[in-house]
Amino acid sequence: MMRDRWQNTVATLPVKCLICAKASQLTALILAAALMVSLAGPTLQAGVQSQVEEVVRAAALKNTDVSIMAVDLATGEELLRLDADRPMTPASNMKLVTTAAALSVLGVDFVFRTELQMLMPTDWQKTQGKVVSEYPDLVIKGDGDPAFGDPKLLKRGNLDVEKLINIWVQAVTSRNVTHVNRLFVDDRIFDREYVHPDWPRDQLNERYCAQVSGITFHNNCIELYPTPTRLNESPRVRMSPVARFISTLNRAKTDKTDTFGVTRKPGSNNLTYSGKVHRSRQTPVMITIDTPPTFLGQLLAERLIEAGVGVSEIVLPAEDQVIPQGTLIHAVQTTMPLILQRTNKDSQNLFAECLLKRMGHQQTGAPGSWHNGAAALRIFLRDKLGARAAAFHIADGSGLSSENRVTSHLLVDLLTAVNEDPELSVPFRESLSIGGVDGTLRKRPTYPITGKLLGKSGYIDSVSALSGYLVYDDPTRPSGERVIAFSMLFNGFQPPIYNHQIKRVQDRVLNLLDSEVAPRVSQEVQAQVGGG
């Protein structure tokens, strides 16, 4: 590579000077050219930098703001720097910050635990001095677990949402309970601000805007599977979980096209079906639910009543209401690695927001909120990055808010700090998508690379991002690998510029970076083997 750079430099010298120069003059020219090469800095940095600048320029992204940073973590060498200190909206790259902080604040061994407890009349008598009812109470005690009832994780355990609910029903009926006085849904580990004020109000029915609550169930969404009937007649619509207490209005029709949709009246769970159904849906149409804790209480009460157990009342306890500890009759637990993988690999917004609020509760003891969760995040960043962390502006944990601000430089600094932390590095990296293999990067990069891509993509309106690591086997290093941390943030693009075009630019940058790093690693390995 240095030889190519030297030849290119000499080739630019005037032919006339080379022919006419005396030997001493020629020597001086050669020395001067060599000096120019040395002053230009490492060949890798100069080559990639100019190529990336040309790729961005040739893409004609118009008024798009671009911020790119890449660093070789083995040497500390900056490989790329393009407006790296410009504050940008990170979209789902914000999840990198949230998950790294959750590993530190909550711990890799942290386990979420959602409990079903039974309170006998004597339990109340111990705390209040009187019998409240001759019948027991039930308590669903939330822990902020975003994965409770998650269809994807249930499937791994050969379960579905109906089987999970039935386990709870059987836990009650097996104790010969025929009536429940009150069903408490204790979601107070979080506040009851279910929707972030910055989120797009016209998209709150979409699954990526699911409400955030101290008790989450089934991703706080309902799945709908329409099936055609006779032409022009209403289709059948299967609901999961089945919730007969929900009012539905079926305005959809069986036809020769598929345009089925569903809307939810704000502040309620009343659904209206519309559009046309031609074929049975194998993948569900999803819609968010309102006030998820109440929904779960209604769902369990409905199943209990169907099993012959009456339920007098469903209660969301007041902030200061004291509920005695009951007898545990069932618990569902979820480990931190599962949560992290669903957050980063699958880019689940709800999971990131629950992590943020759970950190807020962990730090303060108060109900987790976006406010105290952001404070916990800032403390983590200050501990990891020092004064530089002040440049972060944290609005939410998932990146759905357009008010988050970060720089590509800061994201690379964070990726570097996490990679160097022996407790955080492995679980954090295992949570990231693997390029060409899984998660949101299973079809990326679109240009070939030699290194292993571990990363997180991100997209909201006018924002596209990709950050993570390029990893190479390198036996010359104590760790056995060479790691490049990178971040690419693109903001403000508008039609006719679309996200798929931005993603191709990002993938091309990875390709150029890889085409320089991979040969360097190979040469260093060969040099060590040859010299050994």
Image: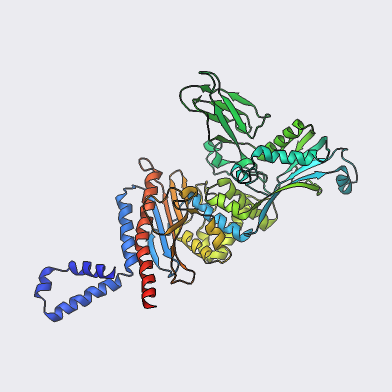
Relative depth, front residue between 357 and 117: 117
Residue in the image at 85% along x and 38% along y? 135
Task: Give the colour scheme shown.
Answer: rainbow
Q: Is residue 27 above or below residue 367?
A: below
Relative depth, front residue between 485 and 170: 170
Q: Is residue 355 left or right of residue 345?
A: right
Query: Which percent across, then down, holds residue 82?
Result: 37, 59
Relative depth, front residue between 11 and 291: 11
Q: Is residue 153 left or right of residue 317?
A: left
Residue in the image at 73% along x and 34% along y? 303
Residue in the image at 34% along x and 47% along y? 61
Q: Is residue 321 above or below residue 80?
A: above
* Quarter of the image where one finds residue 194: top right
Of all residues, the one furthest to the bottom in this rendering is 24
Query: Which percent across, then down, holds residue 219?
Result: 61, 42
* Quarter of the image where one finds residue 34: bottom left
Whether residue 396 is visible here, answered yes or no, is no
Q: Is residue 382 above or below residue 270?
A: below
Query: Which percent across, then down, holds residue 176?
Result: 84, 38
Whether residue 247 is visible here, answered yes or no, is yes
Q: Could you tell me how many numbered marks the image carries?
A: 0
* Quarter of the image where one finds residue 150: top right
Query: Which percent across, then down, holds residue 54?
Result: 30, 55
Q: Is residue 502 above or below residue 82?
A: above
Which image quadrant: the N terminus?
Answer: bottom left
Which image quadrant: the C terminus?
Answer: bottom left
